[in-house]
């Protein structure tokens, strides 16, 4: 039994449209290029095929439904991208935090050893100063052991 709608919908086109699911004609357009239906299922199939129709309100509703679907798909994509970016940011923050702690510890060690450095020195420069200082200390110890 077909479900009847309150108001019929008039679709626009030429010839006929085949219903491949039921293997029969879904609709035939008349000489004016119109096909009017009260059947909700037929109307849904034709709307899904994006067949244009006359009723202005139906067009607006159809376009809004399509727009809502497109926007929802876009929202889903953006939410996934947002989640990916948040994960990248968290990873970056953790890495930078680790680098900051390492640099702070390195500066403290140099300060404790009495090695001078500029606050603006890069971490690599600080590491070289530490290594150079440790080598000098090792050489001094070696000299004092030999004496």
Image (cartoon, rainbow, N blue to C red):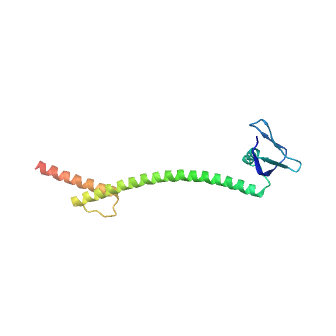
At 66% across and 55% down in the image, what residue appears?
67
Vertical placement of residue 38 versus 125, above or below:
above
Q: Nearer the viewer, residue 116 or 102?
A: 102
Which residue is the extreme one toward the top? 23
**Front one among 57 and 117:** 57
Q: Is residue 47 left or right of residue 108?
A: right
Q: Quadrant of the N terminus?
A: top right
In the rendered image, residue 117, in percent from the top left (x then y), is placed at 28, 62
The number of discs equals 0
Q: Position of residue 26 (x, y in %)?
A: 79, 41
- Nearer-the-camera pick, 107 or 66: 66
Q: Taking 132 as reference, is 1 above or below it?
A: above
Image spot of residue 19 (x, y percent)? 77, 39
Taking the image as shown, residue 143 lies to the left or right of residue 30, namely left
Which residue, as the protein is rendered here, is positioned at the far left?
147
In which quadrant of the rendered view does residue 54 lie? bottom right
Q: Is residue 101 left or right of residue 88?
A: left
Tell which of 73 and 111 is nearer to you. Answer: 73
Is 138 left or right of 120, judged from the image as shown?
left
Q: Quadrant of residue 58?
A: bottom right
Residue 60 on image: x %, y %: 72, 57
Q: Residue at x 68, y 56 (%)?
A: 64
Residue at horizontal 79 percent and vertical 40 percent from the top: 18
């Amino acid at each position: 039994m077909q479900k009847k709608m309150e108001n019929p919908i008039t679709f626009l086109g030429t010839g006929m449209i085949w219903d491949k699911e039921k293997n029969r004609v879904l609709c035939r357009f008349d000489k004016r290029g119109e096909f009017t239906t009260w059947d909700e299922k037929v109307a849904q199939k034709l709307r899904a095929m994006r067949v244009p129709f006359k009723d202005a309100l139906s067009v607006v509703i159809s376009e809004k439904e399509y727009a809502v679907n497109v926007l929802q798909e876009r929202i889903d994509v953006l939410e996934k991208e947002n989640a990916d970016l948040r994960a990248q940011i968290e990873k970056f923050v953790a890495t930078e935090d680790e680098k900051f702690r390492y640099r702070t510890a390195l500066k403290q060690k140099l300060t404790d050893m009495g090695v001078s450095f500029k606050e603006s020195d890069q971490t690599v420069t600080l590491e070289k100063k530490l290594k150079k200082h440790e080598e000098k200390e090792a050489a001094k110890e070696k000299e004092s052991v030999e004496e």
